Image (spheres, coloured by chain):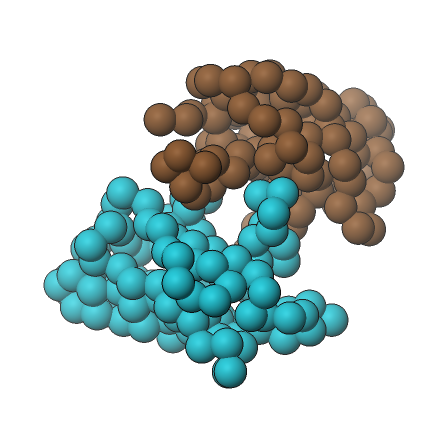
């Protein structure tokens, strides 16, 4: 069974700093099906990155994704106040079919 | 504007049933896979179920297999989740989301809260 492990669990940073979030898969996965989401309190998740590195429509270029195989990274180059939120990685799987989510990384204001 | 709006959540007793609805607008509903994803209070996202555009193919996560049924009415642009034999651990916000060939989920509805408690 595919497991996505996100680290760290919480990242305490100041506005303007760089954030690096990790998503590690328990087995090699296709980067084509790797996505990242942002969720703020009381809101639904919002798609940020798909295909491991493509930004969704309207997502600022301070957000970038990279990685392949079992290791993927979401980078926020310079944190803005509205970026403090929880971030999830997600992998579509074909067998068994469905979606697997990581446990999330909370980016909080230091 | 592409939009998904869930409804039907509420308080239900253990062992009871509830049907959630998700009404879609702004896109060709019948050509898209649709998913249900849930989030227990203070916890992460967990995939629940998916259904193909024509409704002929469905899949479920292990925690809900045999208890939940996903369906859709393409004439009404509406997705459903019939939840039976509900347990306390099914308490969560339930989101519907549109799937794609690249596996991404976008957009998401605002969610509807289901509370299973006596």
Outermost residue, bottom side: B76
Chain letter for the brown part: A
Say which residue appears at 57% left-offset and 61% top-offset: B32
Q: Quadrant of residue A97?
A: top left
Q: Quadrant of the N terminus of chain A?
A: top left
Q: Residue at x 24, y 50 (%)?
A: B65
Q: Nearer the viewer, residue B112 or A72?
A: A72
Name the residue: 74% across, 31% down. A53
Numbered marks: total:
0
Image coordinates of residue A87 in percent, x first then y, are 60, 36
- Look at the picture and state if B27 lies above or below B97: below
**Residue A62: % across, % down:** 84, 34
The letter of the cyan chain is B
**Vertical side of B70 occupied by A56: above or below:** above
Q: Can residue B95 be seen by looking at this rendering?
A: no
Is A34 left or right of B45, judged from the image as shown? right
């Amino acid at each position: 069974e595919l497991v996505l492990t996100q680290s760290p669990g919480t990242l305490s940073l100041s506005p303007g700093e760089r954030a690096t979030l990790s998503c590690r898969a328990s087995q090699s996965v296709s980067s084509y099906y790797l996505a990242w989401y942002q969720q703020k309190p009381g809101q639904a998740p919002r798609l940020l990155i798909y295909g491991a590195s493509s930004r969704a429509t309207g997502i600022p270029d301070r957000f970038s994704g990279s990685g392949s195989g079992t290791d993927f990274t979401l980078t926020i180059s310079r944190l803005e106040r509205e970026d403090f939120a929880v971030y999830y990685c997600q992998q579509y799987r074909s067998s068994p079919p469905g979606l697997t989510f990581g446990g999330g990384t909370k980016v909080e204001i230091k | 504007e592409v939009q998904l709006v869930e409804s039907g959540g509420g308080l239900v007793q253990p062992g009871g049933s509830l049907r959630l609805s998700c009404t879609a607008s702004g896109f060709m509903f019948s050509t898209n896979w649709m998913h249900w994803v849930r989030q227990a209070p203070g916890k992460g996202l967990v995939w629940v179920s998916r259904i193909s555009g024509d409704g002929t193919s469905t899949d479920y996560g292990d925690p809900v297999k045999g208890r939940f049924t996903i369906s859709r009415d393409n004439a009404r642009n509406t997705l459903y989740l019939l939840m039976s034999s509900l347990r306390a651990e099914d308490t969560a916000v339930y989101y519907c989301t549109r799937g794609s060939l690249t596996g991404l989920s976008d957009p998401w509805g605002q969610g509807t809260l289901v509370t299973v408690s006596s």
